[in-house]
Image (cartoon, grey):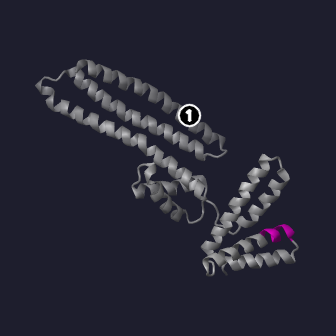
């Protein structure tokens, strides 16, 4: 049975059961489906039906926010009941952890490294979740993951430059390069490595905090990661500055 036919049958069942709330919600949905059918000029597929349902759910959720802001809890409650009726025609929604893992895999496979690649990643991510997550949730996670790449890429660039410099001094060490200068460059490379780890810890904690929802234990763990990462970053920044200033004075 197609999804459109199931909705029609459910409306008939609601009519027989005199379930006015469900009946009203399904009548509005079927009206929207008819309008969509007229627009596309063909029978609606299950995917197209789900798109219409999602649109209806989004409109209702926006209304709920407006009702709550206006202090109309009664209307917010009745509208939420309509959302529950419609959501039974959508695939079960992914949890935050499952969704994050799928989006991570898509980002890794796409080779994206910045928000400039957002469009490319979003198309693949939405196909991967197959309707089991709202576009706004997917976009938020994609944006967070792509933002996390920038500091790491910049850090790796600095690390590579310093590593080349250190390698050069290793090669020339025997020809008279200052031992202290050589040591400072090696230390600065190590400090950069630690800096990347510290920044990654902050980003990881921030992302964990974002997806933890109302789980207090995970919130506390995420805050701990961010706190440790921030302190480590400050210490590392001070060490890096010291090494850089010392090198400038030597050179």
Location of residue 214 (image quadrant): top right
Q: Name the residue under label 1.
A: 224
Residue sitting at the far right: 18
Q: Position of residue 224 (x, y in %)?
A: 56, 34
Please identify the quadrant where the N terminus is shown. bottom right
The boundaries of the magenta stretch are 19-25
69, 125: nearer the viewer: 69
Q: Which residue is drawn at 34% across and 40% down?
A: 156
Instruction: Count residues near mark 1 (Cα–Cα under 10 Å), then give few for <14, some for 14-19, many for 20+.
Output: some
Determine the residue located farthest toward the front in the rendered image.
39
Q: Which residue is drawn at 51% across and 47% down?
A: 144
- Tell me the quadrant of the picture where the C terminus can be found: top left
Residue 212: image quadrant is top right
Q: Which residue is drawn at 31% across and 28% down?
A: 188
In terms of depth relative to the viewer, which is nearer, 171 or 248? 248
Q: In this view, does 5 lie to the left or right of 118?
A: right
Question: Does 37 sit left or right of 227 as displayed?
Answer: right
Residue 128 part of the magenta segment = no
Q: Check the image and report above or below for 49 versus 146.
A: below
């Amino acid at each position: 049975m197609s999804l459109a036919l199931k909705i029609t049958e459910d409306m008939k069942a609601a009519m027989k059961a005199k379930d006015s709330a469900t009946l009203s919600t399904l009548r509005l949905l079927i009206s929207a489906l008819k309008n969509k059918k007229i627009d596309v000029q063909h029978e609606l597929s299950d995917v197209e039906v789900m798109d219409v349902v999602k649109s209806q759910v989004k409109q209702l959720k926006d209304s709920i926010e407006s009702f709550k802001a206006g202090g109309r809890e009664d209307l917010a409650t009745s509208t939420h009941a309509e959302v529950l009726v419609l959501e039974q025609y959508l695939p079960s929604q992914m949890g935050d952890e499952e969704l994050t893992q799928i989006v991570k895999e898509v980002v890794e496979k796409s080779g994206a490294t910045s928000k400039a690649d957002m469009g490319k990643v979003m198309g693949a991510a939405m196909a991967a979740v197959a309707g089991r997550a709202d576009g706004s949730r997917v976009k938020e996670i994609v944006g967070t993951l792509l933002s996390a790449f920038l500091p790491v890429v910049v850090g790796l660039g600095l690390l590579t430059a310093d590593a080349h410099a250190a390698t050069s001094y290793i090669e020339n060490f025997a020809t008279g390069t200052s031992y202290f200068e050589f040591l400072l460059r090696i230390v600065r490379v190590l400090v950069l490595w630690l800096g990347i780890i510290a920044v990654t810890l902050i980003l990881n904690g921030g992302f964990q905090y974002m997806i933890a929802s109302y789980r207090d234990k995970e919130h506390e763990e995420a805050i701990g990661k961010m706190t440790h990462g921030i302190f480590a970053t400050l210490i590392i920044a001070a060490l890096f500055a010291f090494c850089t200033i010392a090198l400038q004075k030597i050179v």
